Amino acid sequence: MDIVQELSKPGRDPRDEMPKPMLRTDVLDINDLKEGMELTGTVRNVIDFGAFVDIGVHQDGLVHISQICDKYLKHPSEVLKVGDIVKVKILSVDVKKNRISLTMREVN
């Protein structure tokens, strides 16, 4: 029954049901982001080389696998899963390419 119910909703993104990140009122756009800012976000996707985190702007930020924690990871899914609420720090912002680099290593 569960499988039939899920197949009856084609094109649905299960990440839409995940909790929304705690948004800051001063961060509404990628242009509002500055290096060193600490934010709270929701993990939207876990891939081989890292995880994408929704921090409340239109573009998700990437936490590279080397920036997730201080120990060696074979895959980011060892410590992260979709829907996790995480604290991140902005490493760099490239407005022209719409890229946000994040770290979880140096966050209090």
Image: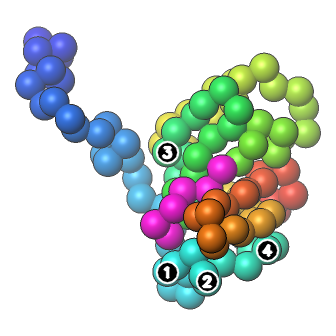
Q: Is residue 40 visible?
A: no
Main SS of the magenta part reads loop
Scheme of image coloration: rainbow
Q: What's the residue at 42%, 59% (across, down)? A: 20
Whole-number angstrom distance, CA of label 3 to CA of label 2: 21 Å
N-term-proximal mark, 1 vs 4:
1
The residue that disc 2 covers is 32
> Quadrant of the rendered structure where residue 93 is?
bottom right
Q: Are marks 2 and 1 in contact (CB under 8 Å)?
A: yes
Q: Which mark is residue 28?
A: 1
**Of discs 3 and 2, which sits in the foreground?**
2
Q: Please determine whether, in this image, residue 52 is positioned above or below residue 12.
A: below
Residue at the disc numbered 3: 44
Ranked by sequence position, the earlier of labels 3 and 1 is 1
Residue named by callout 4? 35
15 is higher (above) or lower (below) than 77: below
Q: Secondary structure at mark 3?
A: strand
Alpha carbon distance from label 3 to label 4: 21 Å
**Label 4 element class:** loop
- Which of the two discs, 3 and 2, labels the residue nearer the N terminus? 2
- Residue type at tag 1: Leu
Q: Disc 1 on helix, strand or loop?
A: loop
Residue 8 image point, x, y percent: 9, 25
Q: Image point 77% across, 36% down: which residue? A: 65
Assess whether mark 4 and mark 1 are in contact (beta carbons under 8 angstroms). no
The 10 Å Cα crowd at callout 3, few under 14, some 14 to 19, many 20 or more, is many
Magenta-tinted stretch: 56-62
Residue 70 counted in the magenta span: no
